[in-house]
Amino acid sequence: MPLIIVAIGVALLLLLMIRFKLNGFIALILVALAVGFMQGMPVNKVIGSIKAGVGGTLGSLALIMGFGAMLGKMLADCGGAQRIATTLIEKFGRQHIQWAVVLTGFTVGFALFYEVGFVLMLPLVFSIAASARIPLLYVGVPMAAALSVTHGFLPPHPGPTAIATIFQADMGKTLLFGTILAIPTVILAGPVYSRFLKGIDKPVPEGLYNPKTFTEQEMPSFSVSVWTSLVPVVLMAIRAVAEMVLPTGHPVLAYAEFFGDPVIATLIAVLIAIFTFGLNRGRSMDEVMGTITDSIKIIAMMLLIIGGGGAFKQVLVDSGVEKYIAALMEGSAVSPLLLAWSIAAILRIALGSATVAAITAGGIAAPLIATTGVSPELMVLAVGSGSVIFSHVNDPGFWLFKEYFNLTIMETIKSWSALETIISVCGLIGCLLLNIVI
């Protein structure tokens, strides 16, 4: 019976979001209420679970996402992203232009949310395609692949960070394993797959985008742009390596854990960026703080949706559904990684939103970790991979890609939907392989 109630809850979520076009946060809260009532929870306990779920999920997550948004916005507004892109393209040359775009997308993707990075890199993609006289998708697909992989696999992006919080996974290890999977995945979905799309040769859309182009003097140096952006990545990676190598109680370990904590790592990066991307570029403190204030608007609704997913998860725990799922899966031969990926993939195809699919799947799949002993970090990556599969007409990202690259619906499916599916399947295969060795 509990699984039937969960299925009804998911069906209700689909109905509210697809049929009635209800906002994801409101829909998740209503579904959490409905599942709690159907499970026979007292009214006051349902409300308490929802509050605890939202608060518990957003505790450290709000800090990480907030600092991450600030860092990304400062990188974009000072011309740092443009500097990274132009320098890499100049170094790689026209012959290896795809690799330059992939590296740019990967580097920028660590600091920027997908939509921001996508819009920021568009003028670069357009100018490369026009000047080199190559098909737009030959450059656009590697860019989108790099941004999508960082969005789906790597903290401090919303999906992986939120799932890591739900699964109580170590952020540093998640980042380390995610990077290991991300590199071959980006290569296959980007430079390799784009070679099969040479038949789709659309012109750069006229008048669709009028970007701000920074002058040489306005932009920070390449090294400053890259290292400031990657400060959180470096600190979290050091912490993960230290925890795997150093024995418990080692004096260095305490410092590695402190500075590598995702909240501290992103805070340090923001403090550095205030100087390198702001004050050192001749901007006043008021201007820099204005950029920081604007950055929060980008993630406000995203935080609420993630909080709604946390509420749904907590209701599943408090109503006993979590224990039922755990008991059901005990001794099962089905890989928990495959199961978690499948749940996220089904929700992604049905709902469109990768973030909502990931958070909802995280709540349903959480009991599998305690029951099976599977690595929570790999479970984060499995859910993240499943949540990006086959983006289609119910996903705003589908239409963003279609319109900016001047494609038909079928061309968008062949390019964008296919590359998202390649990323998802590669992520699953990578998780299953890593599970053998760790």
Image (cartoon, rainbow, N blue to C red):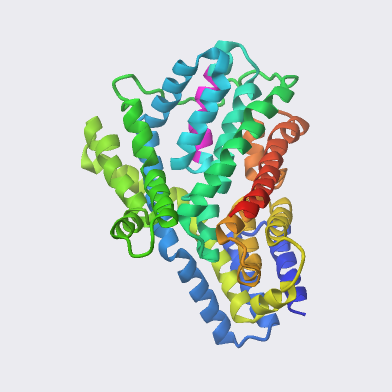
- Residue 404 in magenta? no
Residue lying farthest to the bottom in this orientation: 42
Instruction: Considering the whole magenta stretch, tell me its main secondary structure.
Output: helix
**Foreground pick, 346 / 190:** 190
**Foreground pick, 202 / 64:** 64
Magenta span of residues:
116-127
Residue drawn at x 61%, y 58% is 379
Residue 25 to residue 230: above or below: below
Residue 250 in picture, x, y percent from top left? 32, 60
Residue 45 in picture, x, y percent from top left? 56, 85
Q: Toward which corner of the image does residue 310 lie, by quadrant?
A: bottom right
**Foreground pick, 404 / 109:** 109
Residue 429 to residue 104: above or below: below
Residue drawn at x 63%, y 75% is 316
- Residue 125 in magenta? yes
Image side of residue 402 versus residue 100, left or right: right
Residue drawn at x 52%, y 72% is 53
Residue 427 in picture, x, y percent from top left? 65, 46
Q: Toward which corner of the image does residue 257 lie, by quadrant?
A: bottom left
The answer to whether residue 295 is visible is no
Residue 417 to residue 217: above or below: below
Residue 328 in picture, x, y percent from top left? 74, 75
Residue drawn at x 54%, y 17% is 128
Image side of residue 23 versus residue 303, left or right: right
Q: Toward which corner of the image does residue 96 lie, by quadrant?
A: top right
Position of the C terminus by quadrant: bottom right
The answer to whether residue 203 is visible is yes
